[in-house]
Image (tube, rainbow, N blue to C red):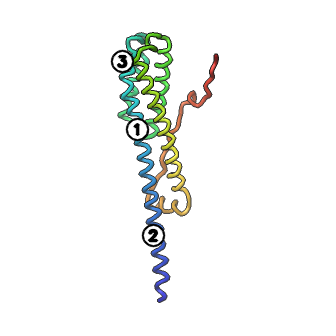
């Protein structure tokens, strides 16, 4: 009968290891799912851009460098593989889209164009979805990375080579500044 206690202890340890491993795998998959949600929204934004560019092309003849920049960024998107690469492209595209919207302010006919207005609204909806997806992704990554560092799951994580995931961060200092509104 003395052997029952060691067997129960080993069984409890094995069950704990399995539970911790499965929770780490579940969290890693949630991180991947959260990233794919950002990816879907960013792709949606890139799909809207050619329509937006076509809408403003006739008005923006001397701003062709802005349109070229958007096209180049859209092409680079397919080559980006990591969260950091896509975050940098996303930040650059956000800056470029702000430029397009600012330039559009100079063309009253364009601002009144129904096609442009509907594309602008669609783009704004997409931007909101991207913001929510980024926040959800970062929350999910933070929970996962925390689980990798706390005891006892850190032991299981290192045994099975779980690695931390990168947060989706803004590396554009201009985007971090407060917006100054003047009337």
Residue at screen point 51% across, 41% down = 135
62, above or below 49, in the image: above
Q: Which residue is mark 2?
A: 15
Mark 1 vs 2: CB contact within 8 A: no
Task: Place residue 67 in its image quadrant.
Answer: top left
Query: Element type at marker 2?
Result: helix
Q: Position of residue 11 (x, y in %)?
A: 45, 75
Q: Which residue is mark 1?
A: 39
Q: Residues within 10 Å of mark 3 (few under 14, many from 20)?
A: few
Residue at screen point 62% across, 28% down = 178
Q: Residues within 10 Å of mark 2 (few under 14, many from 20)?
A: few
Label 3 or label 2, whichever comes before in sequence order = 2
Residue at screen point 52% across, 56% down = 147
Q: CA distance from mark 1 to mark 2?
A: 36 Å
Query: Element type at marker 1?
Result: helix
Q: CA distance from mark 3 to mark 1?
A: 24 Å
103, above or below 8, in the image: above
Query: Element type at marker 3?
Result: helix
Mark 3 vs 1: CB contact within 8 A: no
Can you say which quadrant of the picture contains the C terminus? top right
Q: Which residue is mark 3?
A: 54
Q: Position of residue 50 (x, y in %)?
A: 36, 23
Label 1 or label 2, whichever comes before in sequence order = 2
88, above or below 21, in the image: above
Q: Position of residue 150 (x, y in %)?
A: 56, 58
Q: Residues within 10 Å of mark 1 (few under 14, many from 20)?
A: some
Residue at screen point 48% across, 72% down = 13
Q: CA distance from mark 3 to mark 2?
A: 59 Å
Is 155 left or right of 60, judged from the image as shown? right
């Amino acid at each position: 009968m003395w052997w029952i206690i060691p067997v129960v202890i080993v069984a409890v340890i094995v069950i704990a290891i399995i539970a911790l491993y499965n929770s780490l795998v579940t969290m890693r998959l949630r991180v991947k799912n959260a990233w794919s949600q950002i990816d879907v929204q960013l792709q949606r934004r890139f799909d809207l851009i050619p329509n937006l560019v076509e809408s403003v092309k006739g008005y923006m003849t001397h701003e062709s460098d802005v349109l070229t920049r958007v096209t180049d960024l859209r092409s680079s998107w397919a080559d980006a593989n990591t969260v950091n690469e896509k975050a940098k492209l996303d930040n650059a595209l956000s800056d470029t889209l702000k430029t397009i919207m600012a330039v559009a302010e100079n063309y009253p006919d364009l601002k009144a164009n129904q096609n442009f207005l509907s594309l602008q609204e669609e783009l704004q909806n997409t931007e909101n979805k991207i913001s929510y997806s980024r926040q959800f992704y970062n929350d999910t990554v933070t929970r996962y990375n925390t689980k990798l560092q706390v005891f006892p799951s850190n032991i299981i994580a290192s045994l099975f080579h779980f690695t931390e995931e990168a947060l989706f961060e803004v590396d554009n200092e201009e985007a971090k500044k407060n917006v100054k509104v003047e009337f």
